[in-house]
Amino acid sequence: MVAVIKTGQSVRRVFHYNENKVSEGTARCIGAENYPADHDKMTSSFKVNYLVRTLELNENVKRGSVHISLNFHPSEKDLNAEKLMDIAQNYMSEIGFEEQPYLVYQHFDAAHPHIHIVSVKVKSDGKRIDMQNIGRNQSETARIKIEKDFNLIKAQGREKEIYNELKPIDTVGVQYGKIQSKKAVSRVLDFVLDNYQFKSLAQLNAVLNLYNVSASRGSEKSRTFKAGGLIYRIIDSNGKYSGVPIKASDFNNKPTLKFLEKKFEENKLKNNRPGIRIKNVIRNIFQDDRPTLSQLESELDKIGISMVKRLSAEGSLYGLTYVDHITKHVCNGSELGKEFSAAAISKNCSTSENEIKNRPHSPEVKTLLEIQEILHLKKISVNGLQDLIQVLTEKEFYSGHIPKEFKRKKKNRKRKGLSNN
């Protein structure tokens, strides 16, 4: 079992993320603990307002929402709703949330069984629950105990394998026309905005583009840009827009430019040393080998890191953005240090024959490549080339007639008694 704990400012956002999954048919609410009624006897508004009122008992708590996911190995197919509720109750008790109101949702949108738990960290007496290092301490202890008590596959020693299998949303990008556009984009936004630590609109798009979604302010002359608006669009695999744009204000969670700018600042403060895993992974790859840029991209992808290339209109690489799907960090190469910038990575990577052929060349480079290709076709060796160069460049003795125009003029040597003869 793998447990992921996240806190946030809006419990409504977390609640609606799970309720939207229920509406789409990819999740269901299977329990409500410490509520005045069973989960199927309460309306959605009552469920969320009960959490909000509990949170309002302590106005000093800014990040009061708690969103936990418990993820199980894909082979564990016998986890029915009753057993999942028992696991959720045991887990919440072990981490000190046994008296907190919380909702449990069973999700069906990934290859592995998993549940989501929504709660708040303010007690009924208004005191705040300390969650400092809860993931490393209480949660880890709870995980080990639950794995033993419920005979679950152990996560320890299998984190890499399990994390690579966990896909919170479909890895297949959203495609216009296959499902309702707004619902598809909303599903991507709910997950990305709630989980990834992006610090600019460009970094957000580095993640969204992986799921065929793009956020845009429009051109500088457009009404949207001048009004400080934001639109979301579906894009195809080539980055071209599909369908009509959707205004940010049309979504339930209101992912407007104002909201995002606040999110940018929050994410900058969250972690003053982002991308440590990214840096270590890249250094390890270069320590063992000198891959091509394509090979580096493939190696990073295998361990849950997407390397997004920023290209100029001419197709040349001018920037790199790394998206770590495990830690959820989004970092520009230059932000991590010079050795991770586009220029340094390109320099350290070896160049494959295909990359040479596809790279734009100056006339001089093209000529050299043409010569190299001719030598290869004629099967002329390097030594043969050196002999050819020597023959073409060595001086020759010439005794034939030289035109008058090319004859060097003789200097007048009659001065001081000297003669030209």
Image: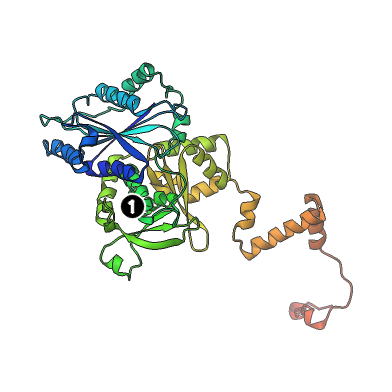
Towards the viewer: 221 or 270 = 221
Answer whether residue 197 is visible to the viewer in this image. Answer: no
The one nearer the camera, 396 or 150, is 150
Is 348 on the left-hand or right-hand side of 45?
right
Q: Position of residue 73 (x, y in %)?
A: 44, 28
Q: Nearer the viewer, residue 28 or 219?
A: 28
Residue 320 placement (x, y as % from top left): 45, 50
Name the amino acid type tagged 1.
Ser
Picture residue at 36% right of the left edge, 48% below the top: 187
Name the residue: 61% across, 52% down.
355
Kindly indicate the quadrant of the structure image that contains residue 14: top left
Residue 55 in sight: yes
- Give the image location of residue 116, x and y in percent: 32, 34
**Which quarter of the image is occupied by the C terminus?**
bottom right
Residue 315 vs 339, above or below: the answer is: below
Is 45 left, or right, of 105 in this rendering?
Answer: left
Say few, some or many: other residues with alpha carbon within 10 Å of mark 1 (under 14 / 14 to 19 / 20 or more).
some
Residue placed furthest toward the front: 41
Q: Quadrant of residue 214?
A: bottom left
Residue that numbered label 1 is attached to: 200
* Residue visible at 35% across and 39% down in the picture: 27
Q: Nearer the viewer, residue 192 or 35?
A: 35
Query: Which residue is farthest bottom?
Result: 404
Q: Is residue 307 left or right of residue 357?
A: left
Which element is circle 1 on?
loop
Vertical side of 357 occupied by 33: above or below? above
Q: Quadrant of the N terminus?
A: top left
Image height of 235 relative to 98, above or below: below
**Quarter of image, res 110:** top left
